[in-house]
Amino acid sequence: MLFSDDQAALVHVFAIGLLAVSSSALVGFNLIHPLCWFAIFSFVYYCSYAVLYGLGIYVTYGYSKEPLLLEWFALSAVTLILPKDEVSYQEIASLSTSFLLPKKGNLIKVAMIGSSLYIVAALVLIETGGFSNKNAIYASGDVFIRGAFYAADFVTILYAYYLTLYLIKSGDREKIWIVIVPTIVFLFGMLTGERNYMFSIALEITLLLLAFKRITPAKVLFILGVGLLLFPLTSAYKYFFLSGGVSQFASNDYLYQMLGGEFASAGRNLQILVNNGCEGCFGVESIANEVIRCFVDTGYSCQLWFSNTFMSNPSVMYGFTIVGEGYVHGGIIGVAIVACIEGAIARLLYKASRKSIFFLTVYIYMVPIIIYASRADLANIISPLWKYALLTVLLIMIFDGGSLLSSYRESNKVR
């Protein structure tokens, strides 16, 4: 990358691909290990814009190798921080029944079903409300509908817990909810245009099936490949249930539709920042704001600044780039700091996931969020980590998993 031509996009893509493959190979391509899933999805998010440019499909913002160098550096930093040892989740299945299974009240199932029904009610209001897209939904300010977005996050983490219980002791779980809940989440994602909910619950199911050896890695790779190929269809039918229309695209435009929306945004946004000389424009100390605003509204957001500064229609969400977040705060030093924080979070969650079903639930829920943050920022990792994952799992431990003390004792039985 250093000595290649500045416009040799496909050479730069190959360099990051080599790093991603090497990282995955360290853990035998174990897809549930962060060294594997982080490397694979980082490659897709980091390189999609460069691939499109290299093939002459997408050239709106030009191309230089600096963004790919920054992303290569970020991926390297995260790879060095992530653990090399592998976790076996079969140990969790051997924990005592009193620790593992819910109480007779089964409050978690009630909460999951109740939240799902709430989402269904919101879907009815959205369908009959005359909305044409997600911007119109947000602009309406309807409190009940906006609450459904929070309910979708809540359902997603409850489902991870419920599915884990089913996979460990299926005789005590009702199979019908294993199918109904993700169906509702998928419909919500299609109707609102927020495909991240669909992506999250689909990845949760895949990782849990893999963790408890209900599916082979080869089948997972096949599913991921098919999913990527079918991804343009989710864009084409994005607002079908609202407007009845389908976005048309030519067969020679298929690659752009597959990579140009969701996946190319991280590379595109970083290229825009590099083009406009935004290196260190905020100062490295302002990274602290990105953490603080996860708990207190500071009135400032890198994503909002980016949209208002560089995009002609700031009301549309263009995403951001977590590598670019470090770049605007402190150049290469800022990139290193943000990458280290991101890697440390993934490392802690993975190491803790072997302790109990509760920590495993947090880890599984956070995997798609960390992946999605490639086109967002640190706040999109830290905020849902404590607002949804940790708080929800704490409630599960209190109301459906026995006392905190007994949970702590049981988790320490696994070394």
Image (cartoon, helix red, strand yellow):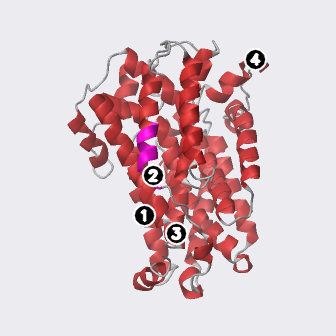
The residue to which callout 1 is attached is: 390
- Quarter of the rendering containing residue 89: bottom right
What residue type is disc 1 on?
A: Leu
Say which residue appears at 66% left-offset and 42% top-offset.
Answer: 190
Whether residue 105 appears in this view of the structure is yes
Q: Secondary structure at mark 2?
A: loop
Q: Earlier in the sequence, mark 1 or mark 4?
A: 4
User: 395 left or right of 106?
Assistant: left
What residue type is disc 4 on?
A: Asn
Q: Earlier in the sequence, mark 3 or mark 4?
A: 4
Cα distance in 3D space between marks 1 and 4 = 45 Å
User: 333 left or right of 356?
Assistant: left
Q: Is residue 202 above or below residue 257?
A: below
Q: Are marks 2 and 4 in contact (CB under 8 Å)?
A: no
Cα distance in 3D space between marks 3 and 4 = 46 Å
Magenta span covers which residues?
75-83
Q: Earlier in the sequence, mark 1 or mark 3?
A: 3
Q: Which mark is residue 252?
A: 4
What predominant SS class does the magenta segment belong to? helix
